[in-house]
Image (spheres, grey):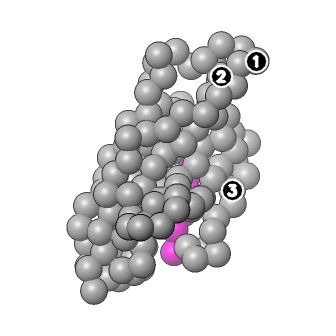
Amino acid sequence: QVQLVESGGGLVQAGGSLRLSCAASGRIYRLNSMCWYRQPPGKQRELVASMTSAGTTISADSVKGRFTISRDNAKNTVYLQMNSLKPEDTAVYYCNAEIEAVRYFNRAYWGQGTQVTVSS
């Protein structure tokens, strides 16, 4: 059984910073791409940033220059450093990972979500 557990959300003032963490545990043969999504109130879930196992990253235009995704493969953990936060960054942030629990059987897993609220 594979689990993704997120931490680090909370309430912060505009201009502040937060760091989200997402740790994968359980039966893991290979951890492939790891991503962060977010779902603002009343809106659809959107991709924030992703990182392959080789280190290639992409990020949404709305967060470029402010958010940084990184990962520690030894700890099966992905991070999202969020700086210069804006009220429009308020959302539930979800971790997503493509994991092979068994070799060649790759599937997506989701964390439970962590709330980030940015006050103006």
Q: Residue at x 33, y 63 (%)?
A: 116
Query: x and y percent of residue 64 in the render?
Result: 60, 74
Q: Nearer the viewer, mark 3 or mark 1?
A: 1
Q: Residue at x 64, y 75 (%)?
A: 61
Q: Give the Cα distance between marks 3 and 1.
A: 23 Å
Q: So how many labels did they put on this image?
A: 3
Disc 3 residue type?
Answer: Thr
Are the two marked residues, 1 and 2, in contact with CB atoms closer than 8 angstroms?
yes
The residue beneath circle 3 is: 57
Whichever of labels 3 and 1 marks the residue nearer the N terminus, that label is: 3
Secondary structure at badge 1 equals loop
Q: Which of these two is toward me, 67 or 4?
A: 4
Query: x and y percent of residue 104 in the render?
Result: 76, 18
The residue beneath circle 2 is: 100
Q: Magenta stretch: give its range.
A: 66-71
Whichever of labels 3 and 2 marks the residue nearer the N terminus, that label is: 3
Are the two marked residues, 3 and 2, in contact with CB atoms closer than 8 angstroms?
no
Disc 1 residue type?
Answer: Tyr
Q: Is residue 88 above or below residue 47?
A: below
Q: Nearer the viewer, mark 3 or mark 2?
A: 2
40 part of magenta stretch: no
- In the image: residue 53, left or right of residue 40: right
Disc 2 crowd rating (10 Å Cα; few below 14, some 14-19, many 20+) is some
